[in-house]
Image (cartoon, rainbow, N blue to C red):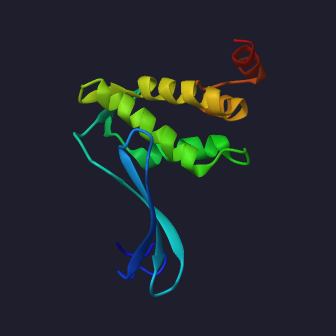
Amino acid sequence: MKCAFCNKGDTQVLESRTSEDKSVVRRRRECGHCGKRFTTHERVTGSVLWVIKKSGQREQFDREKLKRGILRAIEKRPVSLDLVEDTVSQVEREMLRKEREEVSSRAIGGSIMRRLKRIDKVAWLRFASVYMEFEDIDDFVKAVKN
């Protein structure tokens, strides 16, 4: 494994831990060259999953894009990065369990919304405001009341 900082191949695993469902192995590593530490996540890659967007456009499922959206929603909130990674993995597994090659962006967004609501209500509202395309303050009020 190459170092995330100096790109040298001299890294050592300090700790390994599997996720609850045993689908991901989290490894804490240290670079023998620069001494910095970083974390990697190993997972089995399965079939290719396609996302059908609202516009009808198809694009390949992208874990990192999903993660970026959640990270934006939890910014400055007391939510751990491990919980974000677990959430992304849960959503991905849920979509793969549908046993279809294509899923709608709506299904993915709904899955994220359900999980964020349990994790952090402010993050949920932030995500909802983008996902549900809030236009004004009344949209926020309706979402909170519902």
Quadrant of the snapshot with the C terminus: top right
Which residue shows up at 35% across the image and 40% down it?
61
Q: Position of residue 6 (x, y in %)?
A: 46, 81
Residue 129: name its quadrant: top right
Q: Position of residue 35 (x, y in %)?
A: 52, 83
Which residue shows up at 50% across the image and 86% down it?
34
Q: Nearer the viewer, residue 120 or 146?
A: 120
Quadrant of the snapshot with the N terminus: bottom left
**Can you see residue 52?**
no
Q: Nearer the viewer, residue 59 or 96?
A: 96
Residue 124: name its quadrant: top right
Number of callouts in the render?
0
Q: Position of residue 128 (x, y in %)?
A: 62, 27
Residue 20: name its quadrant: top left
**Can you see residue 65?**
yes
Which residue is situated farthest in the top direction here? 146
Judge whether 19 appears above or below 36 on screen. Answer: above
Q: Position of residue 17 (x, y in %)?
A: 44, 55
Which residue shows up at 60% across the image and 31% down it?
116
Which residue shows up at 37% across the image and 43% down it?
22
Which residue is situated farthest in the bottom direction here? 33
